Image (tube, helix red, strand yellow):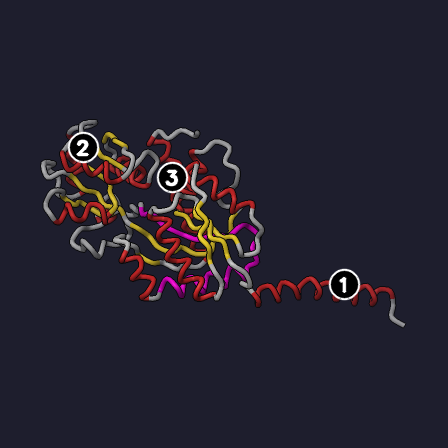
Amino acid sequence: MFSIKRRVLIASATLAAMTWLPNVSMAQDYPNKPIRLIVPWAPGGGTDNIARALADELGQELGQSVIVDNRGGANGVIGSAAVARAAPDGYTLMFSDIFSHVLNSFVVRELPYDIVADFSPITQISSVPLLFVVHPSVPAKNIAELVALAKQKPGMVSYASFGTGSAAHIAGEMLKLMGDIDMVHVPYKGGANALIDTLSGEVQANVSGVNLARQHVEAGKLRALAVTGSERSKYIPDVPTVAETPGFEGFEASVSFAVWAPKDTPPDVVGKLNSVIAKVIATPRFKEKLEAMGTETQTIGNSPEQMAETIAGYVKRLPRVVKAAGLQAQ
């Protein structure tokens, strides 16, 4: 006869096996139904367009439909909250940009989720750089000269962005902080409106999307000073990065798109999604879809751990810039 102790051990082992087997089965079968990809922004924007390109290719690779679900509103909070509350089974994911996701933790009062603890990073998809440009009447041919001009005329140099709290706004404030200069921020509702007043000389400088400003740079109506990404733009390779300017080493203010799952999503499901997405975004077909949108993107496809490090970097850098920009919690 078995001893009581041995019976307990056998029963415990059996229970552990019963608990483990369904998880193995779920990981092996995943996905066996459609996946919902929540985009916390309205349809038709840049984020939505990239998400739909990814969803189409990802669905073909996984053999299941990946349905884009737009949950716009409150600067991304509504859609993000829906993902944070979703079941952690890999069937609800989020596609958004890291900058906006992190920024909300500093500018939204009583945020209904924790930007780190309530989400499982999967991978970064791509990074979209911005471009510092000036009207031709401005006597600055690079970032160093723009900084020197702002120091000579404190509070007299203005720069436009596509909105208060936008990545362009933060890029301008980072330049002010690192250069110890005083420039006036002029926010607009969208990049196109900001460019109109820069082209007319109403504002001297602008932090714009490369795709929006490039045609005007090529036509000689604007002068490009530097791109905000970690690499030069392939469209305007002669224009340096801000980080190449002495004193601005480490400057980086790109819009980085990524995919998250709810917290506690099984690691093997996260791992599978990571590897499949990395495979998809490395294909020429996916890159061609991004090119067709007219937006320069640098595909990434890093690990969940590397994505978490990127988020941590934003969490560390943004508070000082947010304070300098005078952004208040709403």
Label 1 with label 2: CB-CB less than 8 Å? no
Res. 318 mark:
3
Q: Amino acid at mark 2?
A: Val
Q: Amino acid at mark 1?
A: Ser
Count all numbered tags in the image, as a single digit.
3
Residue 275 x %, y %? 45, 64
Pair 1/2: label in front: 2
Indicate whether 118 appears above or below 155: below
For marks 3 and 2 on the same chain, the one whose residue lies earlier in the sequence:
2
Residue 26 x %, y %? 60, 63
Which quarter of the picture shows residue 278? bottom left
| Residue position for label 1 | 12
Res. 203 mark:
2
Which of the pair 142/178 is nearer the observer? 142
Residue 57 x %, y %? 40, 62
Please say whether residue 147 is visible from this viewpoint: no
Indicate whether 328 appears above or below 301: above
Label 3 with label 2: CB-CB less than 8 Å? no
Q: Residue furthest top?
A: 155
